[in-house]
């Protein structure tokens, strides 16, 4: 059985001390303190490591604070990241199958008999080249059931402000692609809240931000709270055994 912790939407900013009534650095360090008490095999940070735009200083600050988890760490880009600079700071894992372009980095690895894709939707699109690569890897590695980490959810998730303003731009193409798998678990961030949606073989788990959460109902931007959270999940033979969202408590 493989145990994974997913953290998303850290949004580290080094200049401002406080924004949206929450310090993203302080909240992130709180989560690191919280997960230090947890037994897990891998730590996945699913995009938006940077505040407005990615930069070397931000990623080096994160690298320094994540030193203890270097061997366990996996990262992907979000819409506020710079993929090239991100992976300069956090090299791809050994033995992964990866693609690096001028603007995107995505990869696949098999861990303890579990097939895992780490996708790049930093531009808000699961692009054609990436979709074709997924099909190629699926066939080459004979993958039936799969687990995917990507920043943008491939379905509407009921967080109205984000669904209406900042969705994955080609959700339908992503959904059609994921039908090639018998079962597809997708773990996302981007929307700053938690949710779950199932559609056919597709199970989408939305993970809250470590910075602040966005209210679900309003169509306009509204902060629900500034409590950081992470997702814990257990996977065995590509099946999700359990998952829960854990919030920081004073």
Image (spheres, grey):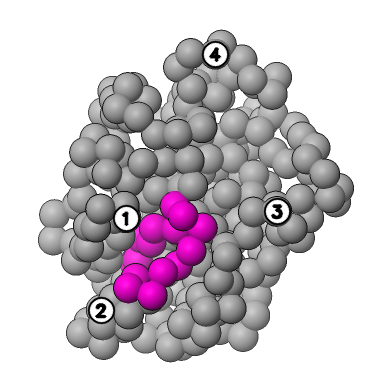
The mark closer to the camera, 2 or 1, is 1
Which element is circle 1 on? loop
Give the Cα distance between marks 1 and 3: 23 Å
The image shows residue 136, relative to residue 210, as above or below, that is: below
Q: Is residue 88 left or right of residue 1?
A: left
Whether residue 182 appears in magenta in the rendering, the answer is: no
Tag on residue 104? 1
Q: Which residues are magenta?
A: 116-130
Q: Which mark is residue 137?
A: 2
In the image, farthest residue toward the right: 218
Where is residue 244? Give x, y as percent: 59, 53
Q: Which residue is mark 4?
A: 16
The kind of secondary structure element at disc 3 is helix
Q: Quadrant of the N terminus?
A: bottom left
Residue at the location (46% across, 48% down)?
78
Please tell me in which quadrant of the rendered image residue 141 appears: bottom left
How far apart marks 2 and 4 lie (CA) works out to 42 Å
Quadrant in which the C terminus appears: top right
């Amino acid at each position: 059985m493989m145990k994974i912790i997913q953290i998303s939407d850290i949004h580290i900013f080094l200049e401002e001390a406080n924004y949206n009534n929450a310090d993203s650095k302080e909240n992130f360090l709180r989560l690191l303190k919280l997960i230090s008490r947890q037994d897990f095999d891998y730590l996945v940070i699913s995009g938006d490591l940077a505040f407005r735009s990615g930069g070397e200083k931000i990623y080096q600050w994160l690298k320094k604070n994540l030193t203890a988890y270097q061997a366990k760490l996996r990262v992907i880009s979000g819409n506020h990241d710079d993929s090239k600079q991100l992976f300069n700071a956090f090299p791809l894992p050994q033995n992964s199958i990866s693609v690096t372009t001028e603007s995107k980095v995505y990869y696949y690895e098999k861990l303890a008999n579990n097939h895992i894709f780490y996708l790049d939707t930093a531009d808000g699109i699961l692009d054609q080249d990436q979709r074709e690569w997924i099909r190629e890897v699926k066939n080459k590695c004979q993958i039936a059931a799969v687990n995917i980490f990507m920043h943008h959810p491939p379905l509407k998730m009921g967080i109205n402000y984000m669904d209406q303003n900042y969705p994955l731009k080609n959700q339908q193409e992503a959904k059609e692609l994921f039908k090639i798998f018998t079962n597809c678990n997708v773990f996302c961030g981007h929307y700053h809240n938690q949710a779950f949606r199932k559609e056919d073989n597709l199970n989408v788990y939305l993970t809250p931000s470590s910075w602040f959460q966005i209210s679900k109902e309003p169509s306009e931007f509204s902060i629900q709270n500034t409590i950081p959270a992470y997702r814990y999940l257990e996977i065995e033979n590509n099946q999700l055994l359990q998952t829960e969202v854990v919030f920081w408590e004073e």
